[in-house]
Structures are given as structure tokens and as C-alpha cells.
Image (cartoon, rainbow, N blue to C red):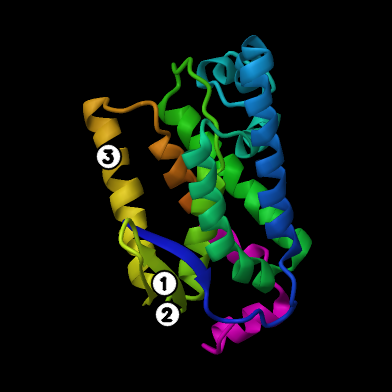
Amino acid sequence: MFIPLSDKEPNRYSGFSSVTLVLIGLNVLIYAYEEALAVSAPENLYFLFYFFGVVPKWIWAQQGLGAVSAITVAFLHGGMAHLLGNMLFLWAFGRRVEDACGRWRFLCFYLLCSVTATLAHVIIHSQGELPGIGASGAVSGVMAAYLILYPWGRINTIFFPLPIRFSVRAFWLLIYFLIISNVIPALQVLFSQADFQVAYWAHLGGLIGGTSIFLFMRPEAIYRFWRQDSV
């Protein structure tokens, strides 16, 4: 399996990707809280997932937090692998997307991708009673934005489980992940009703949200993009 580590290029507009780091930090802290609840009060962890996660049937019935949970869902995770995967991808691709947007625009963009991911999940699984959790939809939006802005950027990558490190063009790496990890499984879920435990359609909803990146970019970054310069 290919695992992205970081973008090889430096930031153009700011030296510190503060929002990306804060988002990662918040997710780690909240997951630590989840783990503490799992040990001390499992019933409260159950409540946390249902109250702040996305339960499609509840949203259609106008129960629970509704629109708010479309944001809070991006800060909950169901396991260490789930958390590490999302945060690794957020760091690898979020840094330069944040640089192209600026801090607050990037935050708004990230949260919008979480909302579009939630909408897709709720529409496809309208009768679902299990809580959807995770930042995968929002991170998918960041990946889509990176693919639009930096298709030929180089990503430091390792091939797990072998300790082989190399760089690969973002276009090929992201197309691989988007098709193998999102598009094909989502179609399998739609046509065969398989594996409802993974919110593949939320991933695709996040990808759709990611195409809105031009609404959030710095004016100078948009100018460079349309001139076909490096953003």
C-alpha cells in the first residue's frame, strides 16, 4: 500500500500551516478523550458517537443535532488506524491547500467538505441508524483540491510494509486513492448493498465539495493558477 508522507515543495505565501496542525491536534485530543471514555464510561462513548456523529435516519426525522453534526462528525474517529490514516493524509495534502487559501478560508473550505460529505451519506443511506463518524469526507475534499491545484506536485511516499521511500507525482497517487479507495467501493455499496460500515459515499461527497476550492483561494493564488504558474 502506498502511504503519502508530505509534499516536497515549500509553502509560497506562509511558512506555517497553522490550521492544518490545529485540526490534527484537535482530532488527536478528541480521540484521546474517546479512548478514556471507552475505559471509564463506555455508555458515554456510545452517546458521543450518536449525538455528535451523523445518523441519517435521525436527520431525516429532524432529530439530533442535524446541521451541526455535519461539522462535529469530522472530529470523531472509530479507531487508531482510522485516525492516523485521516491525519496523515490531511498533513500530506492540507498544508499547501491551506497555503493557497489562507487560514480562515481553508478552515471554511474544510468544514464545507465535511458538510457535503454528510449530505451525500445521508441521501444514499437515508434509513441508516448507525452513526457515521470520521474526517474522511473532509480530507477527501482536501485531496480533490490538491489534485486540482497541484496535479504534478511531488509527494514523499512509502510503500508499506516495505521500508521503500520515494516520491511520486500527486496526479497518479491521488487518482489511485480516489478510484481504489472511494469510487469503486462506493459503487459496490450502491449496487450490492455491501459494507455499510464504511461511508464511501461520504468520501465522494467530500470530493465534490473539494471542487469548490476556487471560492476559497487567495486572489493572488487564483491569478497564478489561471496563468498556469505554480500556485
Quick one: SS at disc 3? helix
Q: Earlier in the sequence, mark 2 or mark 3?
A: 2
Crowd rating for badge 1 (residues with CA inside 10 Å; few <14, some 14–19, many 20+) = many
Q: Residue at x 52, y 38 (%)?
A: 80
Residue type, mark 3 in image: Leu
Left or right of residue 193: residue 109? right
Left or right of residue 131: residue 127? left
Tally of marks = 3
**Residue picked out by circle 1:** 170
Quick one: SS at disc 2? loop
Quarter of the figure with residue 157: bottom left
**Residue picked out by circle 2:** 152
- Quarter of the C terminus within the rendering: bottom right
| Residue 204's disc number | none
**Does 170 appear above or below 193?**
below
**Can residue 204 be seen from the camera position used here?**
yes
Left or right of residue 49: residue 164? left
Look at the image and say whether residue 34 sits in the magenta stretch: no
Instruction: Name the main secondary structure of what is drawn in magenta.
Output: helix
Crowd rating for badge 3 (residues with CA inside 10 Å; few <14, some 14–19, many 20+) = some
Residue type, mark 2 in image: Trp
Residue 227 in the image: state x and y as whole percent.
56, 89
**Magenta span:** 210-231
Residue 135 in the image: state x and y as whole percent.
56, 42
The residue positioned farthest toward the top in the image shown: 43
Residue 52 in the image: state x and y as whole percent.
66, 25
**Residue picked out by circle 3:** 187
- Quarter of the N terminus within the rendering: bottom left
Q: Nearer the viewer, residue 53 or 125?
A: 53
